[in-house]
Amino acid sequence: MLFFFRRFLLVYMGGLLFALAQAEPSLIKLAYLSETLAVKKLQSNLTPELLDEGVQGALLAIADNNTTGAFTGQRFQMAHVEQLTRPRIDKVVGELHDKGIQYIVANLSLETLQYIAKQAAIQNMLVFNASVENDDLRQLDCLGSVFNMAPSYAMKADALAQFMLKKRWKKWLLVRGESPQDIFYSNALKRSAKRFGLSIVKEKMWPHKHNSRKTTQSDIAVFTQETDYDVVVVANSSDFFGDYLLMNTWLPRPVAGTQGMVATAWHHKHERWGGVQIQKRFFKQANRWMTGIDYASWLAVRAVGEASTRTQSRESPVLKKYLLSDDFSLAGFKGVRLNFRLWNQQLRQPILLAIPEAMVAVLPYKEFLHPRTYLDTLGYDQSESNCQLNQSSE
């Protein structure tokens, strides 16, 4: 009897898959938006500029979605709108909507993302933020049309603080640059230090604007001489001086933050939980290693794919409801199910701590307890947040 039941089941499933393959697939359209930004000032002229960062991760996810879609009667298609300049920004959302696109993956500046998201909300479109880490976007300036795939500055800073608390590196020398991103990150670091009972013994801004490696290296010893500290914490998003803090500080101390040991969404040495598989596939496609923006873009497209597969719908209101439900989870090669915080639509995810060629740790530590999930020990918790998009006690 069991034999006949199994045979019937195989025949039934085969027939179902054949029927799905013969049917016209449902087309889900996405767009990837990237912006022309000012080139960062780099200390080394040999550092390559990534011209395809982000979009390569999205392309890999489109291929992954279509592999599944071949069995579920769905097909995913992505348009890439690059070098998005101000005249184009004013009309791009309407153009995409007219083409039947309901989902935007955004690798944009904060200001452009906010403008795009407000226009998208009018058209009932969803925007997946792959690069902006500003906490304001998760706080008072949060928008219901935006799902944040990139971790926030607060999440990264909390990961660093948890690691340093466990190491007993309690006295920080905070060094920052002068860019807005450096200020945002340094503010997040100061919040995290206070939150976990750590002390910033001195905060200093890097004083030089010229690009002289020799001067930078000789000045750092004097710059870091005046106080005692356990670790140098640096906020230098432009990579202009941060790398030269390593091995050049007056005291022999570790460096962490945007250089040294970095807190990041993804790292090319991450191998656990199947990470090797996606690392190799990405390198084969792009001929380079995956970055954090690539990873966030991959997650964004995969989230749309997962939601549309589970709901068998391509309509944004249906997918949004599912993305925010308890049923949604995303496999992100980090050992836990990834899902969204209802109050600010930030993707919950572990943060990787790494040095240039090795992994150091995966945060948060499970010793940091939380009534909902230990992932919510990173960043602004619901009770701390000024953003309450979807009211729920979870």
Image (spheres, grey):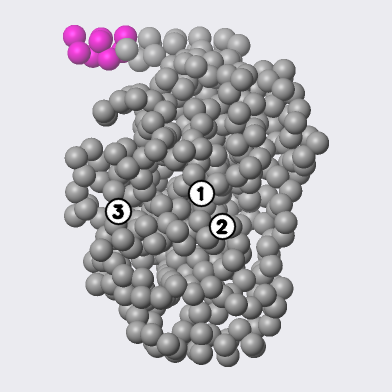
Residue 118 lies left or right of residue 10; in this view the side is right
Vertical relation: 131 (above or below) 264 = above
Q: Which mark is residue 133?
A: 1
Q: Which mark is residue 355?
A: none
Location of residue 374 with respect to 330 vertically, above or below: below
SS under mark 3: loop
Q: Earlier in the sequence, mark 2 or mark 3?
A: 2
**Callout 3 amino acid:** Pro
> Can you identify the residue that label 3 sits on?
364
> In the rendered image, is residue 330 in sight?
no
Residue at coordinates 63% horizontally, 50% vertically from top-left? 53
Q: Is residue 105 visible?
A: yes
Q: Nearer the viewer, mark 2 or mark 3?
A: 2
Q: Are marks 3 and 1 in contact (CB under 8 Å)?
A: no
The residue indicated by pointer 2 is 181
Q: How many marks?
A: 3
Q: Counting residues from the N terminus, which is met first, the one under dot 2 or under dot 1?
A: 1
Residue 94 percent coordinates (x, y)? 72, 22
Residue at horizontal 61%, vertical 84%? 216
Under circle 1, the secondary element is loop
Give the Cα distance between marks 3 and 1.
18 Å
CA separation in Å, label 2 and label 3: 23 Å
Extreme residue in the right direction = 87
| Residue closer to the observer: 87 or 262 | 87
Assess whether mark 1 and mark 2 are in contact (beta carbons under 8 angstroms).
Answer: yes
Q: Quadrant of the C terminus?
A: top left
Q: Give amino acid for label 2.
A: Gln
Q: Quadrant of the N terminus?
A: top left
Q: Nearer the viewer, mark 3 or mark 1?
A: 1
Query: Which range is magenta?
Result: 1-8
- The image quarter in which residue 353 lies: bottom left
| Secondary-structure class at tag 2 | helix
